[in-house]
Amino acid sequence: MLIRYYGHSLFTMETENGTLVAFDPFDSHVGYPMPSLKPDAVLMSHGHSDHGYRDLFPKAETVIDAPGDYRLKNGVHVTGIPAFHDDAQGAQRGNNTLYKVQSDGLTVVHLGDLGHALDEAQLNAIGRADILFLPVGGHYTIDALLAKRVMEQISPKITIPMHYKTDVNADWPIAALDAFTRYFDSIPKAMPILRVTKEDIGCAAKVIVMERARD
């Protein structure tokens, strides 16, 4: 499996048989370059334009934007898990869908704009996670400290932080990456692509920072 990061909360995962799944496409106001990809499926955690801009990938065969159980081609299994964009049961910012994607013997979890610690039902629905895409910037999502707690709740093999301040969104009221990474003793150099298999995932670092990929 290949994992690439395009900024904000947009990742792709490419399975061994070539199925390409994209998470949380953004529109131009986010500031990152708009990737010219052709994913087979697009998963959107919620309808805000920095996470649910479906027009970024108009040729995708499948678009998922709600909780449920979905079967994609080549045996890719997607589970959408209901959650909230805030810690007030969605009263402030609405709903948020967590996605669990299973393929190649691996489980990838994307938390979207999670705004709260996870409850028992959500943790049971997630189950074992190999790779976790975790928002860490705060204000619109969980902050760095709560992100660390959520990471501990899920206990994935690899955690990849997302949704933090960079030079692209320097005027946004969110924290920079080091607000999260300071909780860990050693973070390896950022990488443009993560290649992982079920056989070698145990050799990877616990927290991995990713560079923004180029098309």
Image: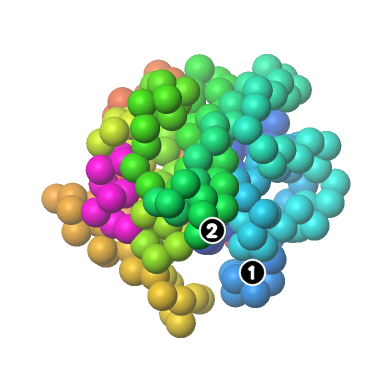
| Disc 2 residue crowd, few under 14, some 14–19, many 20+, Cα 10 Å | some
Q: Quadrant of the N terminus?
A: top right
- Residue at the image point whose x is 71% and y is 38% from the top: 64
Q: Is residue 103 magenta?
A: no
Could you say where residue 110 lies in the image, as x and y percent from the top left?
A: 50, 40
Confirm whether residue 38 shows in the render. Answer: yes
Q: Are marks 2 and 1 in contact (CB under 8 Å)?
A: no
Could you say where residue 140 lies in the image, as x and y percent from the top left?
A: 45, 62
Q: Which image quarter: residue 74?
A: top right
Q: How is the image coloured?
A: rainbow
Could you say where residue 33 lies in the image, as x and y percent from the top left?
A: 64, 69
Q: Is residue 144 magenta?
A: yes
Q: Which image quarter: residue 97?
A: top right
Q: Is residue 101 above or below residue 150?
A: above
Mark 1 secondary-structure assignment = loop
What kind of residue is marked 1? Pro
SS assignment for the magenta stretch, majority? helix
Q: Earlier in the sequence, mark 2 or mark 1?
A: 1
Name the residue at the left extreme: 185
Residue occupied by mark 2: 93
Could you say where residue 76 lies in the image, as x and y percent from the top left?
A: 65, 23
Instruction: Using the image, tell me which numbered label, if any, was put on residue 33.
Output: 1
What kind of residue is marked 2? Arg
Q: Quadrant of the C terminus?
A: bottom right
Q: Which residues are magenta?
A: 143-151
Horizontal side of residue 135 vs 28, given as left or right: left
Instruction: Using the image, tell me which numbered label, if any, was put on residue 117.
Output: none
Mark 2 secondary-structure assignment = loop
Q: CA distance from mark 2 to mark 1?
A: 26 Å
Horizontal side of residue 131 vs 21, given as left or right: left
